[in-house]
Image (cartoon, rainbow, N blue to C red):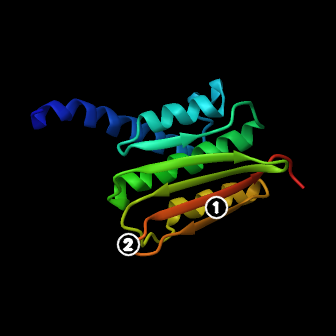
Amino acid sequence: MAGGEHLPRARAQLDQTLDELDDLARGLHPRDLAGGLAAALRALVARSAVPVALAVPGGRFAAEVEAAVYFVAAEALANVAKHASASSASVDVRRDESGLTVVVVDDGAGGAVPRRGLIGLADRVQALGGRLRVESPPGGGTTLTAYLPLERA
C-alpha cells in the first residue's frame, strides 16, 4: 500500500484523538458511554493507533465510575500512541464485589513519568475514592492500574 493511502486513516485517527482530548480537557461525559462502558471501550480501542486487546465486563455502573474508567483508558491509550513506541496494548477491566479495576498495559519503551494529564486522572480517580498506579521501568513497557469503588465509602 502506498504511503499516501494511509493519510486519510491517519487524519481520521488524529481528528478523533483531538476530539477525545478536548473531552478529557473539559471533563465532559463521553458520547460513547450512552451505550454502556463495554460499548464505549470497544469504540475507543477500535480508534486506537496501536492494536489493543480488550476485556471488559458487561452491565452498567454508576455514571461517574464509567466515565472515570473511560478517561483512564483514553488517556493511557493516547499516551501509548504518542510516547511509548509500542506495537500493542491491552485494556483489562475487572469487577469484584467492591469495585472495578482497569489495567492498561503496553509493550513500549517504558520510562514513563507521570505528567499533568496523569495527575488529573489520579485526581479524578481519588475523588471517587479510588487509586491510580503507574509502573514503567525503562525498556519494560508501562502498566497503568486504576481501582474505582462501586460505592463511595
Point out the residue furthest to the bottom here. Answer: 138
Q: Quadrant of the C terminus?
A: bottom right
Could you tell me if the residues under marks 2 and 1 are in contact, i.e. CB atoms within 8 Å? no
In the rendered image, the residue lying farthest to the right is: 153
Q: Is residue 25 visible?
A: no
**Residue for badge 1:** 122
**Badge 2 is on which residue?**
139
Helix, strand or loop at label 2? It is loop
Q: CA distance from mark 2 to mark 1?
A: 24 Å
Residue type at numbered disc 1: Ala
**Quadrant of residue 57 within the rendered picture:** top right
Q: Which amino acid type corresponds to the residue marked 2 in the rendered image?
A: Gly
Task: Depth check: give the residue in front, 28 or 102.
Answer: 102
- Residue placed at 9% from the left, 34% from the top? 2
The percent coordinates of residue 62 (x first, y second) are 78, 37
Left or right relative to 141: residue 128: right
- Residue 147 position, x and y percent, is 71, 56
4 with respect to 29 (left or right):
left
The one of 122 and 37 positioned closer to us in this rendering: 37
Within-10-Å neighbours for mark 2: few <14, some 14–19, many 20+: few
Which callout, 2 or 1, points at the residue further toward the start of the chain? 1
Give the number of the mark in front: 2 or 1: 2
